[in-house]
Image (cartoon, helix red, strand yellow):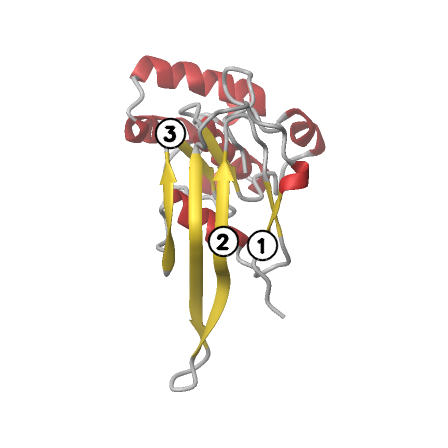
């Protein structure tokens, strides 16, 4: 049986009282067509998902493989269109996808520069943020290394660093620690460059 992912409210850190949600989703539905034509049939992976994330919350999506967790993440950040429902958000989003979306011929430094421009960050702020993230995640020695020459663990660090670069109000993490060594995993829980928890990591 196929199941829509569950919102793990029991694991949420209490948000600030009286604050407006950073992100709301209502009635999200999504189906994919599977099989060979003419026998293709729709497979519903999301069925009327409602979600509200407030500042200060840490929320988990729980579900079996294929239940639609990554699909929901992509819809929340606008990378995938829902079949039905609405998503609204306020402030800047950071998204760390399960599969790093990187350019093999660019170095780590070049990725930060590229994403900094896309975020509209000044060159000085981008360089400062980059230094902080290299130090926090422990991969500064790979600053000049191309992405296609990095190990899986270092690619995961770059992927997470790019999501954190703009110090987002809302940080969405889709299995961000895959490939991390134990020391990095222990020291890199949900956080922002300022040292405070992000608005609503998911």
**N-terminal-most mark, 3 or 1:** 1
* Disc 2 target residue: 49
Which one is closest to the eye, mark 3 or mark 2?
A: 2
Considering depth in this image, is 56 or 70 the residue closer to the camera?
Answer: 56
Residue 83 % position (x, y): 37, 61
- Tell me the element at label 2: strand
Distance CA(mark 3)–CA(mark 2): 22 Å
| For the residues bearing labels 1 and 2, Cβ distance under 8 angstroms | yes
Q: Residue at x 63, y 70 (%)?
A: 1
Q: Residues within 10 Å of mark 1 (few under 14, many from 20)?
A: many
Quarter of the image for residue 33 reads bottom left
* Disc 3 target residue: 92
Considering depth in this image, is 64 or 46 the residue closer to the camera?
Answer: 46
Residue 67 % position (x, y): 57, 60
* Disc 1 target residue: 5
The answer to whether residue 150 of the structure is visible from this angle is no
Distance CA(mark 1)–CA(mark 2): 9 Å
In the drawing, does residue 20 fall left or right of residue 120?
A: right
Which residue sits furthest front? 18
In the drawing, does residue 169 fall left or right of residue 156?
A: left
Distance CA(mark 3)–CA(mark 1): 25 Å
Considering depth in this image, is 187 or 149 the residue closer to the camera?
Answer: 187
Residue 169 % position (x, y): 44, 27
**N-terminal-most mark, 1 or 2:** 1
Which one is closest to the eye, mark 1 or mark 2?
A: 2
């Amino acid at each position: 049986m196929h199941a829509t992912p569950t919102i793990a409210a029991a694991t949420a850190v209490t948000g600030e009282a009286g604050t407006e949600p950073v992100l709301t989703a209502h009635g999200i539905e999504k189906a994919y067509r599977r099989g060979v034509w003419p026998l293709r049939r729709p497979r519903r992976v999301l069925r009327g998902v409602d979600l509200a994330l407030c500042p200060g919350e840490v929320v988990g999506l729980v579900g079996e493989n294929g239940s639609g967790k990554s699909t929901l993440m992509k819809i929340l950040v606008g990378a995938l269109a829902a079949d039905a429902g609405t998503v609204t958000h306020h402030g800047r989003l950071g998204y760390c996808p399960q599969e790093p979306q990187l350019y093999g011929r660019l170095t780590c430094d070049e990725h930060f520069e590229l994403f900094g421009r896309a975020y509209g960050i000044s060159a000085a702020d981008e360089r400062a943020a980059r230094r902080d993230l290299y130090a926090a995640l422990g991969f500064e020695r790979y600053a000049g290394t191309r992405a296609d020459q990095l190990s899986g663990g270092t690619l995961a660090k770059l992927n997470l660093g790019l999501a954190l670069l703009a110090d987002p109000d809302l940080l969405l993490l889709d299995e961000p620690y895959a490939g991390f060594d134990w020391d990095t995993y222990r020291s890199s829980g949900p956080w922002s460059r300022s040292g405070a928890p992000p608005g609503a990591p998911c």
